[in-house]
Image (cartoon, rainbow, N blue to C red):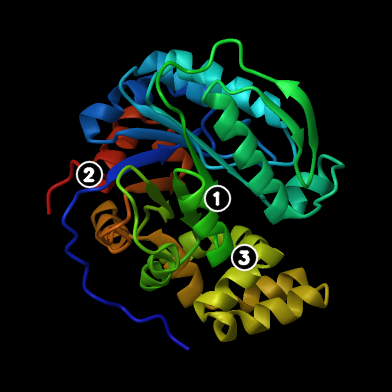
Amino acid sequence: MTVPMTSPPRPHDPPRWGITLPLPGLSLDRHRFLVERLPDLGYTDVWTGEGGGSDAFTPLAASAAWSPGLRVGTGIVPVHTRGPAVLAQTAATLAQLAPGRVLLGIGASVPAHVTDINGIPFDEPFKRTRDVLRFVTRALRGEHVSGDFDTFSIAGYRLPEPPAEPVKVILGALRPGMLRLGFTEGDGAITNLLFPEDVPKVLDAVGPQPPGKELVVKVFVCPTEDTEHARRATRPFLAWILNREPYRKFHEWLGNGELLAETHRRWAAGDVEGARRALPDEVVDGLFVSGSPEECRRRILRYHRPGVTTIQLYVSLPPEVLADRNRLLDTLARLGPGAEG
């Protein structure tokens, strides 16, 4: 099976563009100059994730102070590793720094981030995500929430100071059930690690999108023309994540199961190095975009279809670029929405 190359779509509405922070290899305290310049480069958002590295909220609080006009979003916070009220409190506090510009992205994550490093059972991920979504949505509206959910019980909670302007709650979503939940009970969804040709299937699963809902597509980017370096740098991560059960099932649903069958077989047999080698180059090149910044930008734009509201970039840069502020800003400018052509 091969991944077809198609011409970039011509969507009607331009998407928002965001950057995932902190950039790998650059400590948070060295990001202020970058965050302050992002609006000048055309970027509208700052996003974070939460797994085994930085927490999701500290970089957003710093970014809200450094560049007050940016939207700030978590993409995503696992629903098992923070209590429902703590999630609501944290989002409400962040909303005091960025009123009307907070997107709380929550999701099931993977057992490696929930059980393996936190010792928390990865139980009923869909139901837990649904229950936390329902709780935080009500709590952020200022409602008193109490009673039994399927995966937890609440004696009674109300935010003392609910956000004056709404916080959007979106779901990390891969397959139809979670995608539909995000759009029916939440404010949308964020998806990632898919080929541009897979986006229409996600959009079909979502169905008609009411105004104001978000579909965020996270795109992984390694802007270098050294293809072999890019493959060496990104293959271990891709082999690891694509062999997590949620992503294995995601790509089977998308129709990419045959393309990944050998890496899945070797990983299940305990052959980690063999699983990395078995990952086809077309998968590595397709899921972690590389090339010159201009070529990367052309490929990023292929993810924007009508219905995609935001492109979120995860950018992996070499140390020599991270160490040079001018080169770093120039690279992001050439990658991003402000670039020509």
Task: Please state if 305 lies on the left or on the right of 58 as rendered.
Answer: left
Residue under the point 54% across and 78% down:
280
Q: Could you tell me the amino acid type at mark 1?
A: Gly
What is the number of the mark on residue 84? none
What is the residue that sits farthest to the left in this orientation? 341
Q: Residue at x 34, y 55 (%)?
A: 209
Would you name the residue on which mark 3 appears?
Answer: 247
Check disc 2 and report its element: helix, strand or loop: loop
| Residue wearing tag 1 | 172
State which mark lies toward you, 3 or 2: 3
3 and 1 marks in contact (CB < 8 Å): no
Say which amino acid is labelled 3: Tyr
Report how far apart the C-alphas of labels 3 and 2 lie in the structure: 29 Å
Residue at screen point 16% across, 56% down: 12
* Figure quadrant of residue 181: bottom right
- Whether residue 301 sits left or right of residue 265 in the image: it is left
Amino acid type, callout 2: Pro
Mark number, residue 337:
2
Q: Position of residue 114 (x, y in %)?
A: 77, 45
Disc 1 is placed on an element classified as strand
Can residue 75 be seen by looking at this rendering?
yes
